[in-house]
Image (cartoon, rainbow, N blue to C red):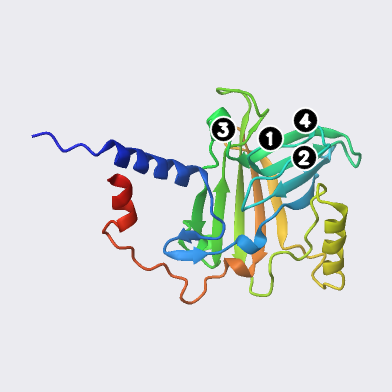
């Protein structure tokens, strides 16, 4: 006798649930290895300037902007070619030296599933469970984000895939916003408020969010942005372990199926 087939409604529900979990990231409720983390206090765009002086003749000037909780918002009045596309979570802007001229716009990571078939596809690792010996003594989590490409609209094997690796390191003395640089796209009054907040902060120059490197890696020449974010929100708190879930289906699930 053939195995019973699932009702169409249930099949569609399970497929939709799988799809949503594959392309989204709920920063307020991250569960990895039965540990729950809430990174929502770090929401909003955060920018980091970084100079790549690895080449003896050329110094590249980058600005990387990240929002771990939501897609970056477009800026009114700014040319479309000077910003990353809708759905971007991590964006890189390379400029010509110290000048304002933009050399290239690099969508590092984002959810572009609808138009380009490239999801955010977040991969989350608890640092204590990492295979790396160097991570064994760390407390926190690593979030790997995908979907980016440069040039962005190249299809197939053309262009360079991109991804972001952000390590959130437990630091009980930091809220994660020390030395924060206002996104250049923020309103002037927001930038002024951020500057006033940072006045007198002893850690202002010691930024909590840092760029470790941005370079092509592997045989496929994938552009990999590595960042480190020190914050108390990456610390494992007592009682934050996630209890085992019931194996039974709740009333709401049965209601949808019916």
Left or right of 127 on screen, residue 255: left
Q: Which mark is residue 109?
A: none
Left or right of 251 on screen, residue 138: right
Please name the residue that numbered disc 2 is placed on: 93
The reply to whether the C-beta atoms of the residues labelled 2 and 3 are less than 8 Å apart is no
Left or right of 224 on screen, residue 181: right
Residue 37: percent from left, percent from top: 53, 64
Q: Which mark's residue is nearer the viewer, 4 or 2?
A: 4
Please name the residue that numbered disc 1 is placed on: 85
In the image, 9 versus 134, the foreground residue is 9
Residue 207: percent from left, percent from top: 76, 62
Quarter of the image with the C terminus in it: top left
Q: Can residue 134 be spotted in the picture?
A: no
Q: Which mark's residue is nearer the viewer, 1 or 2?
A: 1
Q: Which mark's residue is nearer the viewer, 2 or 3?
A: 2
Please name the residue that numbered disc 3 is placed on: 219
Dot 2 crowding, Cα within 10 Å, few <14, some 14–19, many 20+: some
The reply to whether the C-beta atoms of the residues labelled 4 and 3 are less than 8 Å apart is no
The residues tagged by marks 1 and 4 sit, at their Cα atoms, a distance apart of 9 Å
Q: Secondary structure at mark 2?
A: strand
Q: Secondary structure at mark 4?
A: helix
In the image, 205 versus 239, the foreground residue is 239
Dot 3 crowding, Cα within 10 Å, few <14, some 14–19, many 20+: few
Residue 131: percent from left, percent from top: 46, 56
Q: Which mark's residue is nearer the viewer, 3 or 1?
A: 1
Left or right of 164 on screen, residue 11: left
Please name the residue that numbered disc 4 is placed on: 81
Pick whichever of labels 3 and 1 is earlier in the sequence. 1
């Amino acid at each position: 006798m053939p195995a019973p087939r699932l009702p169409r409604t249930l099949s569609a529900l399970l497929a939709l649930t799988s799809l949503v979990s594959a392309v989204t990231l709920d920063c307020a409720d991250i569960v990895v290895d039965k540990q729950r983390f809430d990174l929502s206090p770090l929401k909003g765009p955060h920018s980091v300037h970084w100079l790549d002086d690895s080449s003896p003749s050329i110094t590249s000037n980058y600005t990387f902007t990240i929002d771990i909780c939501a897609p970056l918002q477009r800026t009114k009045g700014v040319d479309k070619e000077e910003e990353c596309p809708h759905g971007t979570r991590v964006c890189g802007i390379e400029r010509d030296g110290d000048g304002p001229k933009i050399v290239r716009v690099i969508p590092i990571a984002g959810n572009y599933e609808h138009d380009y078939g490239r999801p955010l596809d977040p991969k989350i690792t608890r640092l204590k469970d990492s295979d790396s010996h160097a991570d064994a003594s760390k407390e926190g989590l690593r979030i790997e984000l995908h979907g980016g490409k440069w040039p962005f609209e190249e299809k197939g094997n053309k262009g360079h895939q991109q991804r972001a690796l952000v390590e959130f390191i437990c630091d009980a003395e930091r809220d994660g916003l020390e030395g924060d640089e206002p996104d250049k796209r923020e309103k002037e009054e927001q930038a002024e408020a951020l500057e006033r907040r940072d006045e007198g902060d002893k850690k202002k120059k010691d930024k909590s969010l840092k760029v470790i490197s941005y370079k092509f890696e592997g045989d496929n020449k994938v552009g990999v942005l590595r960042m480190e974010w020190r914050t108390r929100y990456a610390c494992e708190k007592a009682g934050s372990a996630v209890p085992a879930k019931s194996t039974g289906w709740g009333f709401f699930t049965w209601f949808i199926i019916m």
